[in-house]
Image: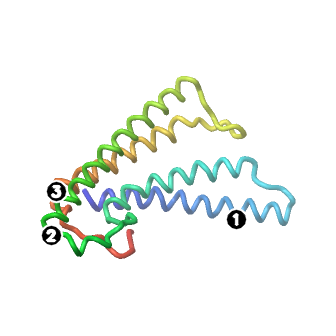
Amino acid sequence: MKKTLELLCGVLSGLALLAIMLLTFFDVSGRKLLSQSITGSLELTELLMVVVIFGALPLVSLKNEHVVFDSLDALAAPWLQRIQRALVNLVCAALLFGLAYLMWRTGSEFAVTGETTAQLKITKAPFIQGMGVLCGLTGLVHLFKAFGAAQEEESSEGGTL
């Protein structure tokens, strides 16, 4: 399951990042060489950034790549550190599930009202609901880390995928 999550989220984020790079390259090239930019490139970049960020969020949580304040960890007993990690993962899971719910609800409202981007008229609802799904998936990762064997893992040093 872990490998599948890494593959799916990694491919999703990677393809979105590749699309941003290609879009930027062709947009800048078109502006410089043809005095013509790609219509809606800013909107597309914004939407693709959503995919990159929220697609990578489960991977960041899975690999413990979050920014952490660990200066006081040397003073705490190992059993206390395990309890702290479990509590932090539970709080993160609860917050991410709440955020997932709010995003899904907002996406549903946008689907009903037909909310679109200003220039290209791309429907916003699937992106916002996708953000909700990925937040929910990240919440599941934290829930698993709070109760599962993964709780004992220390953070890795780079190299998510």
Residue 11 at x, y percent in the picture: 44, 60
Residue type at the position of mark 3: Gly
- Side of 160 relative to 29 (left or right): left
Residue 97 at x, y percent in the picture: 33, 41
| Label 1 sits on residue | 25
- In the rendered view of the protein, which quadrant contains the C terminus? bottom left
Task: Mark 2 or mark 3: name the one nearer the start of the chain.
Answer: 2
Quadrant position of residue 33: bottom right
Tag on residue 148?
3
Is residue 61 or residue 2 the one in the foreground?
61
Tag 2 near tag 1, CB within 8 Å: no
Spatial CA span between label 2 and label 1: 50 Å
| Label 2 sits on residue | 78
Discs 2/3, front? 2
- Side of 29 relative to 52 (left or right): right
Residue 85 at x, y percent in the picture: 23, 60
Classed neighbour count for the residue bearing mark 1: other residues with Cα under 10 Å, few (<14), some (14–19), many (≥20)? few
Please give the name of the residue rendered at 23% of the width and 75% of the height, measured from the top-left corner.
74
